Each structure stands twice: as structure tokens, then as C-alpha cells.
Image (cartoon, rainbow, N blue to C red):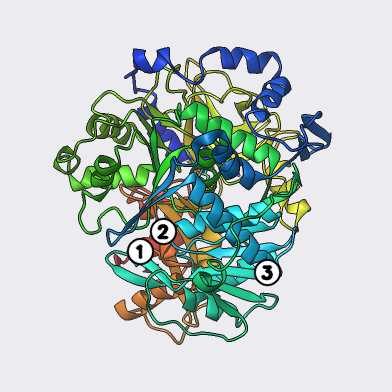
Amino acid sequence: MRLDEECALSNESLANLLKEERRFAPPAELAASANVTADAYAQASEDRLAFWAEQARRLSWAVEPTETLDWSNPPFAKWFADGKLNVAYNCVDRHVEAGNGDRVAIHFEGEPGDSRAITYAQLKDEVSRAANALQELGVAKGDRVAVYLPMIPEAVVSMLACARIGAAHSVVFGGFSADAVASRIQDADAKVVITADGGYRRGKPSALKPAIDEALTKVDGVEKVLVVRRTGEEVAWTEGRDVWWHELVDAQSAEHTPEAHDAEQPLFILYTSGTTGKPKGILHTSGGYLTQASYTHHAVFDLKPETDVYWCTADIGWVTGHSYIVYGPLSNGATQVIYEGTPDTPHQGRFWEIVQKYGVTILYTAPTAIRTFMKWGDDIPARYDLSSLRVLGSVGEPINPEAWVWYREHIGAGRTPIVDTWWQTETGAMMISPLPGVTETKPGSAQRALPGIAATVVDDEAREVPNGSGGYLVLTEPWPSMLRTIWGDDQRYIDTYWSRFEGRYFAGDGAKKDEDGDIWLLGRVDDVMLVSGHNISTTEVESALVGHPAVAESAVVGATDATTGQAIVAFVILRGSATDSADLVAELRNHVGRTLGPIAKPKQINVVSELPKTRSGKIMRRLLRDIAEGREVGDTTTLADSSVMNLIQSQQTTTG
Ligand code: WT7
């Protein structure tokens, strides 16, 4: 896999990117009172470990760590290893003890319009009750608990209750199918599942529990299912296994003593797609993770907990929800909005109505959402009072300069800094981002590694590229919130991240340094597609397609899409017995949706009679991407049979 081949596409858009010459200085007022100033870079580069040791002191430790980093057995890191802390205590109790119990922690906005304000004191009681309830269900320190919930406060409470008792949570996105949930429950060997009857999605109740019921016919080991009543819809019930949240949790004591856990106690597992199909269980631990989630939230959003109202629109099922809805904001004592539903329910101004209603000051969302808002029209946000906003964030994929500038103009009134934050499930917290009171921002660039983080761009031979050149993004020093391993598969952890370049973490993203040395992200260099900010592997979709009796072979590519970043385009060869029809194509799309979840449904499926392969049998997705994006097909000289491309082109269908 050569970069020039894999990144051919990205490099085209890069040429445009680097023509981007607009610059935006930080607002003077923000710069004057910013939480973090330019000194932080100097301080961190002088002594990186001392810098992180100081950030760790932002937390409350039961036993203060004396050791910062143990890197004696790379790539297996230990941070603050001799320290002890309770993550939930840091996110909840200590704010109450500091006299801020009456501060709202969560303004919950349900999709149907119901709302709840939960103070830190109330959150402490609820987390304590849930911790007691989990213990009553037999969950002990070191166990795993799967969480499959809509975006409701109980999701936050469940995660914190696990953290409190030292059980690792494995949150599975509510949009995933029963099969996807089953494989994740099995891999993590979860003892208890927390779910709900359903949640609200596009104006209707959307059931969740049936997927758990189905998943649990396929896996063993789950002893109890704790069920939140959200929609009130009827659910199937397994006596002896299923327990209502409102019956069990509400009856518990609101007193629960938080035990101090080791800094390296597993905090959560979160699954991310891998190129070989089987999802990777990314393991994060406690002290280092919380240090960096907390510090970056404080630094990059300039959070002032007394006055800011923060809103991250991500789902809790993704890492953004973990680090920037739960652990970062709550460890900092923030007041935040949590919204259950979709941005167009009941109307396309819903997000802006929420910003206006709660006086949101910091908004963190994804480029795919921004592009959708652009498509819906400038007049929609213009109807609302968005003047409370002071910092805007972006995450999930490269943000194109057009969307960046639109975000700043139409949401930020041409005034607010935009922080384009690059990071990954694996990095646990932000790694590359502007600082809103320091950085002169450039539309489309995440710019510079945060203080204490070491990132660079290297070529195929691991040589650092000069300014103005592109290559692979690598991280050159361990960082506190780094993944510790892939759950149950240390070798895969080494192979995936630490083998491509000796001693460096391979992020899998292409990147370029501009003339100032600022970093521009170019997307994935491997075969993982990024659809609406979510990583979906081509192999996973291909295996799902081939899992259908009508399909013999398939190849899947991500084609550039104006709205979702990339759209999934599939090429399938049917089995002899099957015939091409619109019905079959619809059935295949639904089949993928059922197998992997709706987000993985191909936008387009082309039935073809051949696939382009190298002599060694490797599918040349690059050529299929050319077709999917309507471009002239590139170099076909390494194909086993070069006439195949003409054949495929003549067979292109447009079924969407
Ligand atoms: C991949 C990680 C980080 C939480 C959400 C996604 C892409 C993420 C940016 C950004 C360019 C970005 C990368 C990365 N990505 N943020 N600001 N600019 N690309 O987490 O599912 O683990 O995906 O998302 O390709 O490797 P994830």
C-alpha cells in the first residue's frame, strides 16, 4: 500500500486546501482571559512528563501518583501507575463537595420536547443508586457491563455507575443491529446489559430492547438485563433476567462510598471497525484517560464552568460522547445540554432552537452535520438567537474550508473561533487542535499538536516530511489517554498501530504539513470508510453482502459524498441462481442494514460480472472508486485482466 496510490484522491483536494489563505485571529477578549495560553506549548516541550503530571493534579486523587509514565514495555504504557482515584467521584461528588451541588450538570432535552434539569447533587444521588443497583445485580470490580441506550441521562448515569464500582462499560451505539451487539457483548464477555424499551427517533418511538433479546439468544454469559422505561412501549420480558431500572435503581440508597481504583483500572471498552472485519475493542483505563479528557476539554473549549453552557451533539455510543459528554465536561463541572434526537425533528431549526433555549456558549458537532445544515439553508439558523455562542468545535472527519467558513459565519456570527479537533477512538482524547485563545485559525486545518502531544507526518520510509509535503500522520510519544491495548488481543494492538513505523503510533490517516508546519488531515489511508463521521470498514460491509445467499463476491468503496463525507458504494457479483433486479438490490441494502446497522447500508449497489483484481487476487478498490466517483479509470496495468474495467463500466447501474 503506497501512499501516493491510496491518497491520490485526497491529494487532489489537498491542492485546493492549501490554496486556502483565509486566517482568523482569536477574539481579543477570549485571548485575554483564556484558560490556556501560548506558554503551555513551551512548558510542555520543555518537560512533557512534568506537564502531564501537572495536568493530572487537576483531578482529585485518593493516592497521588509519584510516577508519571512507565514506558518500560512499549507499546504497553502505564500512566500515573501508583496513583489511585475514583473517576465517578471526580466527575460528580467533588463538585458537590466544593459547594456546586446546585449547579445544573445536565439539561436534558428529549426529542418529543420533554426536558429535565439534573444538578450535580441529583446526579451524585442517581449515580450512587445505580452503583448500588449494579452491585446488587452481582456486578463487581473488573466485570464488564454492556450499555445499549438512547441519548438519555440514564446513559451517563450508567457509565458513571460502572466507573464508580470499577466495572468497565462497553457502550454499543443504539443504531447497531442485534448481530453487531451480540458480537460486542461476546467479545467483552459482559455480565449485565443496560438497555431501554426504546428511544425517540424522528418523531416516533424506536425500540431497543428487541435487539438485546435477539442478541442474547446468540451469546451466553449475560446474567441480568436492566431496562430503562423511556417510551412506555410494550416489551417482551424474560423473568429472572430482566429488571426494570425504575424498580431496582429507584429503590436503592443514594449513599455509595466511591472506592479508590488503580489509575490503570480499565474504564471502558469501545469497539471500532477494523479492516479485517472483526471490530476492535479499544481499551481505555482511568487516570491517564481522565487527565487528558479533562485537560483538553478545559483547554480547547476554554470552558468556564460557572458561566458556560456546553453542548456536544455526538451520540454517547461513540468516543466523542464518552470523552466530551461524560468524562471531560463532568470532570470539569460543566453545565451541558444532552439532546436525544435528530436535528430535523420536528423541524430543521431544532438545534438552533436548543442553542437559543439554553443559551449554549460552546457547541461541538461534526462536519457531516454542518454540511447538512448548509444544504437546508442559511435562513434556518438566521431565525434564532445564537448570540450566546463563543466557541465552535468540529470533529470526526476533515472539515472542508467551505463548511468551516459557513459554520463560523452562519452559526458563529463571524465572531467565534472554530476548533477543528483531530483524534480517534484509540487516542481517547483530542490530539491536534487549535487553542481558541491562542491560534490564528485556518479553515480546514486542525493545525498543531496540543501541548504535551507529539505528532508529525512521515513518508513511506518513516522519514519526517518537510513543510509543504504529505505523508502519514504518526504520534511519536505516548500520551496519557492512549488506548492500552485491543481487548483480548495484544498482538493485534502491536500489529495495527505500532508496526508500520518503528516506535511510532500509526494513526492510519494521511496528512500534509503546510509551509508553516501546520497539519492538514486528508482522511484514512486504509480501507476504512468514514460515513457521517463514523468509521465503517469495507471488509465488514463486504462480508455482510457475501453473507446473503444471492451474492458471490463483493467489493466496497467509500466514494466522496457532499453530505456524509463518504458514501458506501458496493459492487457485487451474483450467484448463478440469482438475477439482478431493483428488488434484489433493495433486499441487499436492507440485509447489510440488518447485519451491521443502518449506517452501513450501501448508498449504491452495482451488479457486475467481474471485479478488478491483481494477480495475487487483491481487489483494486482504487479503480472502483474511480468508477464510483465518475472519474476516468486510472492505471490498470497491474490488473490480472485489464479488460475487466470496460466490462464493469458497461454494467454500472444507478440504484440508490
Ligand atoms: C478518525 C477516527 C474522534 C472522534 C470521532 C471519530 C477522522 C476525526 C478528525 C478531524 C480530520 C478526523 C480521522 C480519524 N477524524 N477527527 N478533526 N479532521 N479527520 O472517531 O471513529 O475513532 O475515527 O476520524 O480519520 O482517524 P473514530
Dot 3: what SS? Answer: helix
Q: What's the distance in space between the residues labelled 3 and 1, CA to CA?
A: 49 Å
Tell me: residue 591, above or below residue 419. below
Q: Crowding at label 1, few (<14), some or many (≥20) Cα neighbours within 10 Å?
A: many
**Which residue in the structure is indicated by mark 1?**
604
Dot 2: what SS? Answer: strand
Q: Quadrant of residue 438?
A: top left
Q: What's the distance in space between the residues labelled 2 and 1, CA to CA?
A: 7 Å
- Residue at position x 80%, y 38% in the image: 81
Residue 116 screen position, x and y as percent: 36, 54
Residue 163 screen position, x and y as percent: 65, 52
Residue 103 screen position, x and y as percent: 44, 40
Dot 1: what SS? Answer: strand
* Mark 3 or mark 1: whose residue is earlier in sequence: 3
**Which residue in the structure is indicated by mark 3?**
136
Residue 138 screen position, x and y as percent: 71, 70
- Residue at position x 62%, y 66% in the image: 133
Q: Crowding at label 2, few (<14), some or many (≥20) Cα neighbours within 10 Å?
A: many
Tell me the tag on residue 568.
2
Disc 2 residue type? Ile
Q: Going by the image, does 482 lie left or right of 112?
A: right
Camera-nearest label, 3 or 2: 3
Tell me the tag on residue 267.
none
Q: What's the distance in space between the residues labelled 3 and 2, CA to CA?
A: 45 Å
Q: Which of 310 and 367 lies nearest the eye of the viewer? A: 310
Q: Going by the image, does 369 lie left or right of 573?
A: left
Q: Which of 194 and 568 lies nearest the eye of the viewer? A: 194
